[in-house]
Image (tube, rainbow, N blue to C red):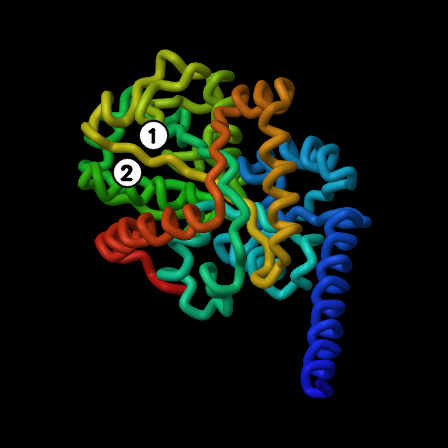
Amino acid sequence: MRVFQKRLNYSCVFLGIVLNALGMQQSFAQEWPDKPIRLIVPFAAGGSADILGRILAQDLGKNLHQNVVIENRGGAGGNIGAELVAKAPADGYTVLLASGSMMTVNPYIYKKSSINYLKDLTYITTIATVPMVIAVSPKLPVNTLAELIALAKTKELNFGSAGIGSQIHMANENFIYSAGIQATHVPYKGENPALNDLIGGQIDFMAGNFPATGGFAKAGQVKALAVTSQKRLRQLPNVPTVSEAAIPGFENTGWYALAVPAGTPKYIIDKIYIATEKSFTSPALLSNLDSNGLTPLMMKGNDVDIKIKAESANWEKVIKARNIPTQ
């Protein structure tokens, strides 16, 4: 009888601890977030990741009932911002807006980086896809993608990017590889500085993200030769796809995801996911995304991991074929 009583007492104590823990978790879930959230954009201001982050932050903050503050931490193809988030407390107050290239390309290029993108971060969801625009300097004597390819076979051209390993860099490398041409890479610390030099004629061509490149193309400051999406863009209806213009079957679409430090509680991840999903019901936000050529794409964490592994294998082939040096 005494043994039974002791076991009963222990069971009651254990049950009390469990219920107390569950109660505390529910309380934390109700209270979070109780201070501003940092959304780390690991690229310079003015680029497509920054544009997307600023479009999303306002609605995300409204849905979470807290301010979401953009913080640009560029460098090393996004690794600097990613490492900052990976080392932050796993409390949901530091969120990463990652580009697909960071997870699928950087591990092959930045060998000295301390971050493991599949172990050190937990992915909440993908948020959007973005096409690129292959554009040339107004000073370059070409008006079609076929002419650009032909010119590249007769003289050495150069192209710009937002940094080694960035989505823009890899879209350019993929185009060059697929076209069977050669060109010299000129890396910049951001997308806008590269575009400024494209306008000025310091670089010859560039596959740039539509949100940053589209406006210059519409204004005639750069010549848009093709888009890298499967279909033509509504915003540039007279610009053919790369597949139409010169390389059948070519497609290269960038994408972005939200991530938090590994170990972040599930209830926080769920709250951010739900708030993001709700943001994509806002007509104003959807209109803003559309005008910037961004298409919403929600895909939960495990599916993001699968997407990363599948794309990594493809980029490894391009990196080896183009002999892109490690950093």
Q: Does 39 sit left or right of 177 as displayed?
A: right
- Rendered residue at 24%/53% (across/down): 317
Quarter that holds the N terminus: bottom right
Q: Residues within 10 Å of mark 1 (few under 14, many from 20)?
A: many
| Residue 246: % across, % down | 21, 26
- Secondary structure, mark 2, is helix
Say the numbered circle drawn on residue 51: none
Between 80 and 139, the residue placed more toward the observer is: 80
Say the numbered circle drawn on residue 228: 1
| Residue 249: % across, % down | 21, 30
Q: Identify the mark nearer the N-term, 2 or 1.
A: 2
Does the CB distance between marks 2 and 1 fall below 8 Å?
yes
- Rendered residue at 23%/38% (across/down): 155
Amino acid at pointer 2: Phe
- Rendered residue at 35%/61% (across/down): 108
- Rendered residue at 29%/42% (across/down): 174
Amino acid at pointer 1: Thr
Residue 91 visible in the snapshot: yes
Between 269 and 313, the residue placed more toward the observer is: 269
- Secondary structure, mark 1, is loop
Between 94 and 76, the residue placed more toward the observer is: 94
Quarter that holds the C terminus: bottom left
Among all residues in the image, which is located at the extreme front?
Answer: 1
Q: Nearer the viewer, mark 2 or mark 1?
A: 1
Q: CA distance from mark 2 to mark 1?
A: 9 Å
- The residue indicated by pointer 2 is 175
Q: Does 314 sit left or right of 10 as displayed?
A: left
The quarter holding residue 202 reads top left
Is 201 located above or below residue 215 in the figure? Answer: below
